[in-house]
């Protein structure tokens, strides 16, 4: 299974992203700061042999696209800065995918302290999900 994580910083990246995804046969695309998730989905599907699906997303900080049907990717936790998904494909070991895009340090005087707080909060949420789902493989993507 191949993953791609990219902070697109609200830039229109559809054509470039589509070429990268097809060229490397990426299965799951995680974008941070994606302002046009619907447009990206159209670009991915226009360039792909397989249909991509937009997973349920809480907002533009972390958006997930996948070649797999939505029924195989359950949302365990989804908040503003992160999401944890349980990926259960037929014939494979279930896996947790945690994707996180921390808040910017640019406009906060206590930025590092705040990011540490958010990271501790996310870590606790992941531990709770692991406790409730059992110990699947864990793939964490952080930016």
Image (cartoon, helix red, strand yellow):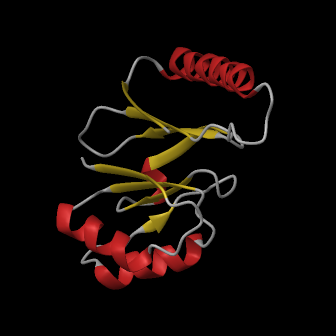
Relative to 96, is 120 on the left or the right?
right
Relative to 95, is 58 on the left or the right?
right
Please say if 4 is above or below 96.
below
Residue 23 occupies quadrant: bottom left
| Residue for point 19% across, 61% down | 24
Closest to the observer, 9 or 107: 107
**Residue sitting farthest toward the bottom:** 46
Measuring from the top left, give residue 100's x and y in whole percent: 55, 38
Measuring from the top left, give residue 2's x and y in whole percent: 26, 49
Measuring from the top left, give residue 116's x and y in whole percent: 66, 19
| Residue for point 42% across, 50% down | 72
Relative to 14, is 33 on the left or the right?
right
| Residue for point 73% across, 19% down | 113
Closest to the observer, 51 or 141: 141
Please say if 137 is above or below 58.
above
Relative to 123, is 26 on the left or the right?
left
**Residue sitting farthest toward the right:** 109
Q: Report the number of numbered marks.
A: 0
Measuring from the top left, give residue 68's x and y in whole percent: 37, 58
Residue 107 occupies quadrant: top right
């Amino acid at each position: 299974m191949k993953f791609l994580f990219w902070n697109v910083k609200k830039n229109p990246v559809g054509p470039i992203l589509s070429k990268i995804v097809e060229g490397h046969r990426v299965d799951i695309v995680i974008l941070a700061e994606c302002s046009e998730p619907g447009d990206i989905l159209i670009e991915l599907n226009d360039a792909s042999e397989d249909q991509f699906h937009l997973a349920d997303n809480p907002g533009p900080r972390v958006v997930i696209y996948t070649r797999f049907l939505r029924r195989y990717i359950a949302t365990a936790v989804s908040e503003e800065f992160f999401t944890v998904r349980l990926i259960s494909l037929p014939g494979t070991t279930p896996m947790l995918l945690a994707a996180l895009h921390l808040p910017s340090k640019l406009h906060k005087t206590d930025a590092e302290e705040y990011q540490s707080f958010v990271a501790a909060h996310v870590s606790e949420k992941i531990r709770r999900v692991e406790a409730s789902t059992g110990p699947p493989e864990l793939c964490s993507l952080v930016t």
